[in-house]
């Protein structure tokens, strides 16, 4: 064991930097965290299969099988607060693309207190919200769309004659240079920023690819958001008929 | 007589194990994963450039293997030869995933059992109890996970790497 710890030490030196991952931080404030929490059901790492009373339940994954509904209701009965973790549980997730199987967000079957969206949920957002939950505070998500604080936003006025003819930039067009950056919509590439919730710190955009909407819709009225956006932009012929651009991470109708 | 272990724990998703017992002997064992996800169906008609993005969401743990496999399938289709550099980058990415998933499996899924089996510690039920067992040790294992995470972040972008927090 001595040896393993030494490995750990040298990693500590390499990685000491800016941000500890959340888990390390929680272990650091270990005593307080331990006093406050206890994991009672988490099949991924433990064998406990009984759902007991608890304060917070974080549920991952969409409902695609009727067998799961009783389990879901049982969790709701036993937990004081239930949150949907990740875009699958919150909006239906990637399986929304499928026509052949159901992929319902958990809010279709039970009432939930809130959601933590993202595919996967951004590390900082998840960490901050989790800490708030443990401190017994309400969690609040941004009510704005991505464009509101996007770094490429400057100088954007959506030009109605702009034709959107691509869903991904070509390799040569991916340029991480600050100066040459311009809003994707202006460049004729579809970006779902206008209808996607802020909170991921524009991960994709900083890496030179447009947003595909994994943080889910800004409001429950997703369809009318999409129609609004569609009224502002023109699609070229070949992507007009391409399916699964908007409802990639979310079912059209969501309750929560 | 058919015995079924309903939910296999410590696997991603759900699995069942069916054990068929005849005359007090096990005659057959089946492991079944019942969840049908339907990726093979809904990927039909999608653009090739969308494939790695969609496919890497089959599960949240082995996104790198899935993305690379889908790229390889596309390359096969068109007989594309990729550069040495791309191969090296992919290998690095896979290393990140390998370190991460082995580390998760060893420290969080098997170690509590091993410690109990070899009588090193009595009261471990889950990785959660590792904190009590040896906080420094758990913290170090998390550092290894972090290193893997950084590898993934560097070579795959930040987006798909937040699953260990
Ligand atoms: S459309 Fe996309 S690139 Fe343009 S400002 Fe909005 S989020 Fe940024
Ligand atoms: S930029 Fe869009 S697709 Fe990328 S992480 Fe953020 S919400 Fe998700």
Image: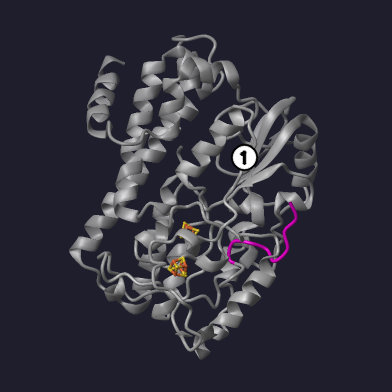
Q: Residue at x 38, y 76 (%)?
A: B77
Q: Residue at x 30, y 53 (%)?
A: B155
Q: Is residue A255 visible?
A: yes
Name the element at disc 1. Answer: loop
Q: Is residue A161 magenta?
A: no
Chain bearing tag 1 is A
Q: Is residue A61 above or below residue A241?
A: above
Question: What is the x, y in percent for residue B116?
Answer: 50, 14
Residue B5 relative to residue B94: left or right = right
- Asked whether A184 or A64 is in front, the reply is A184
Question: What is the x, y in percent for residue A78?
Answer: 77, 30
- When asked about the image quadrant of residue B140, the answer is top left
From the image, tell me which residue sits under label 1. Answer: A139
At label 1, counting other C-alpha atoms closer than 10 Å, the crowd grade (few under 14, some 14-19, many 20 or more) is some
Question: What is the x, y in percent for residue A226?
Answer: 63, 73
Question: What is the x, y in percent for residue A97?
Answer: 62, 67
Q: Is residue B32 visible?
A: no
Q: Residue at x 25, y 25 (%)?
A: A7
Residue A105 relative to residue B99: left or right = right
What span is in magenta? Answer: A248-256
Q: Is residue A227 above or below residue A213?
A: below
- When asked about the image quadrant of residue A253, the answer is bottom right
């Amino acid at each position: 064991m001595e040896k393993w710890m030494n490995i750990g030490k040298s990693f500590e030196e390499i990685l000491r930097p800016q941000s500890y991952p959340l888990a390390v931080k929680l272990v650091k404030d270990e005593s307080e965290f331990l006093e406050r929490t206890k994991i009672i059901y988490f099949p991924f790492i433990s064998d406990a299969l009984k759902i007991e009373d608890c304060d917070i339940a974080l549920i991952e994954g969409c409902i695609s099988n009727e067998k799961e509904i009783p389990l879901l209701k049982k969790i709701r009965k036993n937990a004081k607060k239930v949150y949907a973790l990740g875009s699958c549980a919150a909006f239906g997730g990637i399986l929304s693309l499928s026509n052949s199987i159901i992929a319902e967000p958990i809010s279709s079957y039970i009432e939930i207190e809130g959601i933590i969206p993202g595919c996967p949920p951004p590390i900082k957002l998840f960490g901050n919200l989790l800490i708030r939950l443990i401190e017994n505070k309400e969690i609040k998500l941004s009510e704005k769309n991505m464009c509101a604080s996007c770094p490429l936003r400057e100088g954007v006025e959506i030009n109605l004659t702009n034709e959107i003819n691509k869903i991904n930039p070509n390799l040569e067009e991916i340029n991480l240079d600050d100066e040459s950056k311009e809003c994707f919509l202006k460049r004729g590439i579809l970006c779902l920023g206008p209808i996607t919730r802020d909170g991921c710190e524009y991960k994709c955009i900083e890496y030179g690819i447009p947003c595909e909407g994994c943080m889910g819709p800004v409001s429950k009225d997703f369809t009318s958001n999409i129609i609004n956006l569609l009224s502002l932009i023109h699609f070229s012929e070949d992507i007009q008929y391409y399916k699964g651009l908007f409802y990639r991470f979310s079912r059209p109708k969501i309750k929560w | 007589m058919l015995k079924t272990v309903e939910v296999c724990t410590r696997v991603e998703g759900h699995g069942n194990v069916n054990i068929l017992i005849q005359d007090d002997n096990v005659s057959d064992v089946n492991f079944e994963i019942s969840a049908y996800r339907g990726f093979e169906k809904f990927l039909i008609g999608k653009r090739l450039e969308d494939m790695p993005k969609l496919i890497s969401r089959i599960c949240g743990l082995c996104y790198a293997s899935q993305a690379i496999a889908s790229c390889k399938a596309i390359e096969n289709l068109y007989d594309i030869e990729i550069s040495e550099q791309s191969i090296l980058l992919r290998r690095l990415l896979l290393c990140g995933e390998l370190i991460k998933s082995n580390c998760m499996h060893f420290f969080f899924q098997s170690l509590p059992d091993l410690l109990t089996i070899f009588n090193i510690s009595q009261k471990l039920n889950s990785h959660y109890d590792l904190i009590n067992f040896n906080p420094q040790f758990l913290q170090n294992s998390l550092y290894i996970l972090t290193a893997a995470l950084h590898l993934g972040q560097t070579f795959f972008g930040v987006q798909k790497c937040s699953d260990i927090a």
